[in-house]
Amino acid sequence: MTAATLVPVFAALGHDTRWSILAALGNGEASASVLATTLPVTRQAIAKHLAILKDAGLVEPVPAGREVRYRALGSELTAAARRLEEIGIAWDRRLAEIKRIAEEL
Amino acid sequence: MTAATLVPVFAALGHDTRWSILAALGNGEASASVLATTLPVTRQAIAKHLAILKDAGLVEPVPAGREVRYRALGSELTAAARRLEEIGIAWDRRLAEIKRIAEEL
DNA sequence: TTTTACTGCAACTATTCGGTTGCAATACGC
DNA sequence: GCGTATTGCAACCGAATAGTTGCAGTAAAA
């Protein structure tokens, strides 16, 4: 996972409504119409969010008869998490190094 | 780290310019003015991004004489990464469970 | 003390984003 | 075949966002 693919993932995760959608999909696949019955926005708004989530690779369409269900994909999430953790550890390691040098003086 | 504090972190990470700033800070503390010499936006734009990053807890101001340097904090990043990984694993576990049930039929 | 460099605040602009309504197309159920 | 439910597309609107310029305040340096 490169940085170019990482940023859209975080952008997708940076909105409450999309977390609501992801949380709902955590209980199993659902179509935009079904999601619209429980969430306080219209089906079209949900469809847009699903497109964003799909482009980020966080969600996968599952055609089921005349409707299109969506499934939450955890793999992309864990991949992003790994990258995030690496970067965070690198920063803190640098901070610790600077602190160590400062205390030596 | 609760979901309410998690979403702003991802929103902050969902923009290229802010990643450029974070990458620059990864090489050590820097002020908005210094960052503006290398990045292709004005100091004021960088100052706004730094405020967003600070609110998300990703960055910390370090007053140094008449200037204000900023330091990248890895701790918030790793905390967010842990949460993300948990959620991703939970989703994939559910997917595997569904697949198992489907194969039993 | 005067100059200089750096920060902070405010106003303004253009674009993106989240959301809505309306309509066309299509595939299922009776 | 006919009605109905479901998706997809396009236009539109208001609010938020990313960016700019300009100016005032302030602290270091000469």
Image (tube, coloured by chain):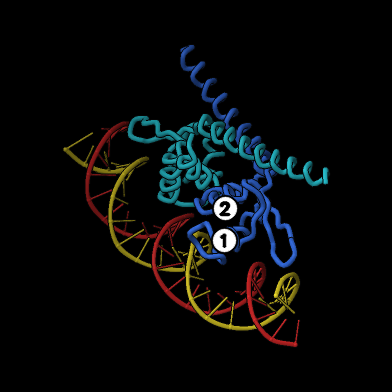
Chain colours: A cyan, B blue, C red, D yellow
Q: Is residue B20 among the parts visible in the rendering? A: yes
The chain under label 2 reads: B
The secondary structure type at the circle numbered 2 is: helix
Return the residue at label 1. Answer: B46
Task: Tell whether A71 sits left or right of A67.
Answer: right
| Amino acid type of the residue tagged 2 in the rendering | Ile
Spot occupied by residue B102 in the image (x, y as percentages of width and height): 47, 17
Q: Which of the pair D9/A97 is nearer the observer?
A: A97
Residue A23 is situated, as x and y percent measured from the top left of the image, at 56, 39
- Left or right, B101 with respect to D30, comes to left
At a point 46% along the width and 12% down the height, the residue shown is B105
Is residue A39 placed above or below A60 in the rendered structure?
below
Q: Are marks 1 and 2 in contact (CB under 8 Å)?
A: yes
Where does label 2 land, which residue?
B21
B14 relative position to B1: left or right:
left
Find the distance from the CA under tag 1 to the CA under tag 2.
Answer: 8 Å
Provide the chain ID for the residue under circle 1.
Answer: B
As helix, strand or loop, the secondary structure at mark 1 comes to helix
Q: Residue at x 69, y 41 (%)?
A: A94
Q: Which residue is rendered at x = 48% and y = 52% of the image?
A: A41
Amino acid carrying label 1: it is Ile
Q: Examine the rendered structure and indicate whether residue A71 appears above or below residue B28.
A: above
Q: Residues within 10 Å of mark 2 (few under 14, many from 20)?
A: many
Q: Quadrant of the N terminus of chain B?
A: top right
